[in-house]
Image (spheres, helix red, strand yellow):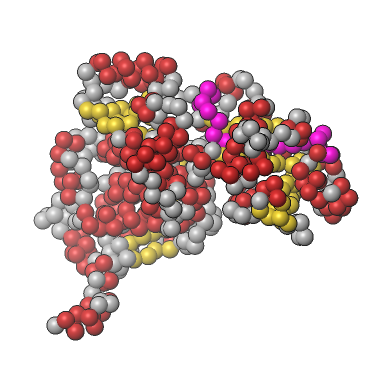
Amino acid sequence: MERLRELRARILYDNGRRPEFRDDAGAHVDDQELDYGAWHFVARRHPDGPVLGYIRLSTPDTGALFQSRAHLGAARYEQLLTAEGAAVGDTYEHSRLVVEQRARKLGLGAYLNAVAIGAAHHLGARLMIGTSGTRDGQDHFHGRFGFAPVAGTRCYVERYTEEVVILVHRTAAGAGEYTELVARMRDEFPLLVTDDLDAAPAARRESPDVPAALATARHGETDAWRPVLFEPHRADDYAAMTDLLESGRVNAVHDTITAQLAELIGCREPQHRYAGAELERRIEEQLAGAEPWAYGSWVWYPWSGRLVHVLPREEFRLVRTDRNRGKIQRPQQRRLLGARIGVVGLSVGNSAAVTLALEGVGGAFRLADFDELSLSNMNRLRAGVQHLGLAKTVICARQMFEIDPYLDIEIYSGGLHADNMAEFFGGEHERIDLLVEECDTPYVKIAARECARALGIPVVMDCNDRGMLDIERFDLEPDRPLLHGRIGDLRAADLPELTAQATSDLILAMVDAERISPELADSFGQIGRTLSSWPQLASDVALGGALVTSAARRILLGAPCASGRFYVDLDALIAPEHNTARELDGALT
């Protein structure tokens, strides 16, 4: 308790901003009797590591000591509870949410808040109450969890050197934009207070056995696609990484952790331009006693033999997606990284999958394709000649892991078919949130949509011709006809009976023969005569990856994105009548 009090007092002191949290001897003090009989939730990077954040949840047993009660006075506090239809016995108070400077901007405050609120929900709270500062927008932060200010309670408090307001949260009303996260924390609360790690959800278990992963990931194997991550502060990982370095299997070591730490500090505090000794001091604070080589993760890519040092997952992603801010804010980034996306067909779909990973749209992926890379694929699929004959799923997974080694990726190198369709879409707790469909097989195109519609999963498809983007919001329209009704009542089960001509007609119906480009329309009659297949260009495929990612981001964030078929036709858009610099060009000539 003394360590927690010192921690929160130091953070609340805030380099002298709140002098009352430091005594004459220079010690940080925050002694409150309310601490006893309360729940305390502490966040660390690993069990023996330094505390990064903390929050307190007080129960009705100590209701007479609540800070909100002291702020309002006993009479007014009881009037407030009566007005809210709550009793002392079902009112909980959360307070003292503090996060270390080096862990801010990572979403830790939101998770601590969600844990405390979820615990209160689990314990039977009808009402939650608390005091909140207003100077740095703390009250607005809590408002995103469904806390509302109580009229007439805002006033300046000398101890906090800012105005403070009373907030209330009605558990029956959910938790605002964090309702889903709070519900998950509510359900997992019993596991947070048990030592039975075997009972914990898979997401919180220890990482896989690293020596076992190394044994199965031999450099040079053509099918290696999953990297091995080491956390050197763990004894087993340290030993396994040492063995790897001594094995001769590492071709190159890349360690830029100091530069990454400097970037982290700059992203977290853009208003400062630290350099020289001050930057070194800030880096030391971020390391918190750890040696630079032991900070974060080392990632071994067995297919290239490279060992790469990167920041811990949350910090790595904060820095990597920092330039997304202004268009995708950090809460939205975290929401997107919580999504699981399925991609079927990895020629055109490779561009979509890699762009999704680059933009941070999706943190978990399932990739399906039965094919291997051939030389004729290399006019549009970003790969090297050394990848010829390699499964497209493997190529794509490698590319995505080299962008973000913390991704969760599963591959289906046999493609998508009736026997694995249910597994690909996933069970209730691991279901994909969105399907990107880019395959050439009519059966799979229709069967995948039938499954997506039955499960309420939206489907996005790009046809890499005239910038055509197809969106089917089965999550909003469960009875929507497949492919906007262009295939009538045809079902996947009917396809084996189709003739070759009927299959060709079906494909033309799917893409709308009247709207395809003249070049593609002319090519259909030449396939098998002067053309080996229909034409596809890298520029069209790259555009398709951008269109799919933009649509996926909008859907997953709940932004307006309706079902339909849309064209971003560059041949039409890059035309003289659309030239916005025509007047300037005329003046120059």
Establish if 201 lies above or below 568.
Answer: above
In the image, taking residue 114 as reference, residue 402 lies left or right, namely left
Q: Which of 305 and 134 is in front in this view?
A: 134
Q: Could you tell me if residue 357 is visible in this image? A: no
In the image, taking residue 439 as reference, residue 25 lies left or right, namely right
Q: Which of 389 and 219 is in front in this view?
A: 219
- Figure quadrant of the C terminus: bottom left
Q: Nearer the viewer, residue 247 or 200?
A: 247
**Image position, residue 425 (x, y; %):** 46, 40
- Figure quadrant of the N terminus: top right
Task: Kindly identify the residue that appears in the image at 53 percent across and 22 percent down.
Answer: 48
Residue 117 within the segment the image draws in magenta: no
Q: Residue furthest front?
A: 24
| Residue 391 in which image quadrant | top left
**Image position, residue 434 (x, y; %):** 45, 48
Q: Nearer the viewer, residue 141 or 165?
A: 165
Q: How many numbered tags mark residues here?
A: 0
Task: Kindly identify the residue that appears in the image at 32 percent across and 46 percent down.
Answer: 354
Q: Could you tell me if residue 295 is visible in this image? A: yes
**Image position, residue 397 (x, y; %):** 32, 37
Tell me the magenta residue range: 46-64
Q: Which residue lies furthest to the left in this view?
A: 530
**Image position, residue 174 (x, y; %):** 68, 49
Task: Kindly identify the residue that appears in the image at 67 percent across and 48 percent down.
Answer: 160
